[in-house]
Image (cartoon, grey):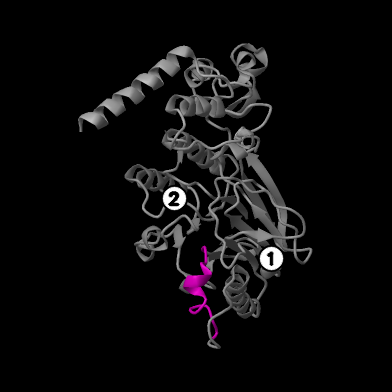
């Protein structure tokens, strides 16, 4: 059996005010194509389908379209992430036709989606995002609420999965997949992105990979960079497929992909990343203004979404419009002098007796690193005098 594992679609998301609908449609079209190209037998979407609990109508329509096309090709198992509203995403799940399995409720944990091939059963156990504050009582065995932690609730969920597996294995071998939306760490570091929402409870947002020991493959969602936490037992494979689209400039260098998982008669035989082409590149640039506007080394970024740091000692005039002349898709342009932030250079604070024009001049120097021009000072002076005249007249 061959599975395609993907996650973190975040339909409805904006990127610094830019609507990503067309870009998301592009990557989802590629996923549908990859299902055909790689002769996939089932698709697992490991949460954060939407970007927020109440998604825009266009995002709902896009999801309906892609699921219709995917289900026509292979069964789809889809679960809720921390960005999704479990109730809204799961509405009507019991009415969906065969081929689409939407799991959003903690009550269904331990109930597998039953698939299979010539080697026998393949059981997919969806574990939607479990908020400890919400489910620590419902997942308890009755000895009071579970501890307030992700490790505790995921451990209880996996106890239910293992109990069901043990019962089914008494009648013959089965292969097991867990699809979970959680922040899981093994030995070593994991790569995070700025676009991932904090799920911290009690100061901790992670659970150890050891809670998933004993199954064949764990299809993870939540982290946007494709990566594999270390196996807890030398057998169980865990992997984040990552988001198929870059959602922050911290992801600018990430190669986006989906994961193809091959299962043989005894478990996982291969796990591979299949690239997803990005509809638009993403770059983070830092240089002085003259270099940014003329240097050929930035030519490749001219059609990218870019974040620009201008390092001139003084803020260049008309900085943002000039940047956008060369980089029309610049989303962030900021002045970051190479000498460092100016906050530490302020030695005196203005008081009521200070000349307002001098205060304004100090502010310009603080913000831009350079002196105000004579026309700027005249404008400040005229504005101040107009306000004073209005106060006297009132």
Label 2 sits on a secondary structure element that is: loop
Question: Is residue 5 shown left or right of residue 16?
Answer: right
Q: Report the front residue among 348 and 125.
A: 348
In the image, 383: left or right of 295?
A: left
Provide the major secondary structure of the magenta segment.
loop
Q: Which residue is mark 1?
A: 208
Report x, y in % for residue 78. 49, 57
Mark 2, residue position: 50
Counting from the top left corner in percent of width and height, residue 220 is at 61, 57
Q: Residue at x 70, y 62 (%)?
A: 265
User: Would residue 305 be seen by someone viewing this image from the given angle?
Assistant: no
As measured in the structure, the alpha-carbon distance from the residue carrying label 1 to the one carrying label 2 is: 26 Å
Quadrant of the rendered image containing residue 173: bottom right
Residue 309: % across, % down: 60, 27
Label 1 crowding class (10 Å Cα cut-off): few <14, some 14-19, many 20+? some
Does the magenta run of residues contain 140?
yes
Q: Quadrant of the N terminus?
A: bottom right
Point out the tag, 1 or 2, that comes first from the N-terminus.
2
Mark 1 and mark 2 in contact? Answer it, CB < 8 Å. no
Up/down of 245 relative to 160, above or below: above
Residue lying at the far bottom of the rendered structure: 143
> Which contiguous range is marked in magenta?
128-141
Q: Residue at x 39, y 61 (%)?
A: 90
As rendered, which of 46 and 73 lies closer to the eye?
46
Q: Report x, y in % for residue 95.
A: 35, 63
Counting labels gives 2
**Residue 113 in view, yes or no:** yes
């Amino acid at each position: 059996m061959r599975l395609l594992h993907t996650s973190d679609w975040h339909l409805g998301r904006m990127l610094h005010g830019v609507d990503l609908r067309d870009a998301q449609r592009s990557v989802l079209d590629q996923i549908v194509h990859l299902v055909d190209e790689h002769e996939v037998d089932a698709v697992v979407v490991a949460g954060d389908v939407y970007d927020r609990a109440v998604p825009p109508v266009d995002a709902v329509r896009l999801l309906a379209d892609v699921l219709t096309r995917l289900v026509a090709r292979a069964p789809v198992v889809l679960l809720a992430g921390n960005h999704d509203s479990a109730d809204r995403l799961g509405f009507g799940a019991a009415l969906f036709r065969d081929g689409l399995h939407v799991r959003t409720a903690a009550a269904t944990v331990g109930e597998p989606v039953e698939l299979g091939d010539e080697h026998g059963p393949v059981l997919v156990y969806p574990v939607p995002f479990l908020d400890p504050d919400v489910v620590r009582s419902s997942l308890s065995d009755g000895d009071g609420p579970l501890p307030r932690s992700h490790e505790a609730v995921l451990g209880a969920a996996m106890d239910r999965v293992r109990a069901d597996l043990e019962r089914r294995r008494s009648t013959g071998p089965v292969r097991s997949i867990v699809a979970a939306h959680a922040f899981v760490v093994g030995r070593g570091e994991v790569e995070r992105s700025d676009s991932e929402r904090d799920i911290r409870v009690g100061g901790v947002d992670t659970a150890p990979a050891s809670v998933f020991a004993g199954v064949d493959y764990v299809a993870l969602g939540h982290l946007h960079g494709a990566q594999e936490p270390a196996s807890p037992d030398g057998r169980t494979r865990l992997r984040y497929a990552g988001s198929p689209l870059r959602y922050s400039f911290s992801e600018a260098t990430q190669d986006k992909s989906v994961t193809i998982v091959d299962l043989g008669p005894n478990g996982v035989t291969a796990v591979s990343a299949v690239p997803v082409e990005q509809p638009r590149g993403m770059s983070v640039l830092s240089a002085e203004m003259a270099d940014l506007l003329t240097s050929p080394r930035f030519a490749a970024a001219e059609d990218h979404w870019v974040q620009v740091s201008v390092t001139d000692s003084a803020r260049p005039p008309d900085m943002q419009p000039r940047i956008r002349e060369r980089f029309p898709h610049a989303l962030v342009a900021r002045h970051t002098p190479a000498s460092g932030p100016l906050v530490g250079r302020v030695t005196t604070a203005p008081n009521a007796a200070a000349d307002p024009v001098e205060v304004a001049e100090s502010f310009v120097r603080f913000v831009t690193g350079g002196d105000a021009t004579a026309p700027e000072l005249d404008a400040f002076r005229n504005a101040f005098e107009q306000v004073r005249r209005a106060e006297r007249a009132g």
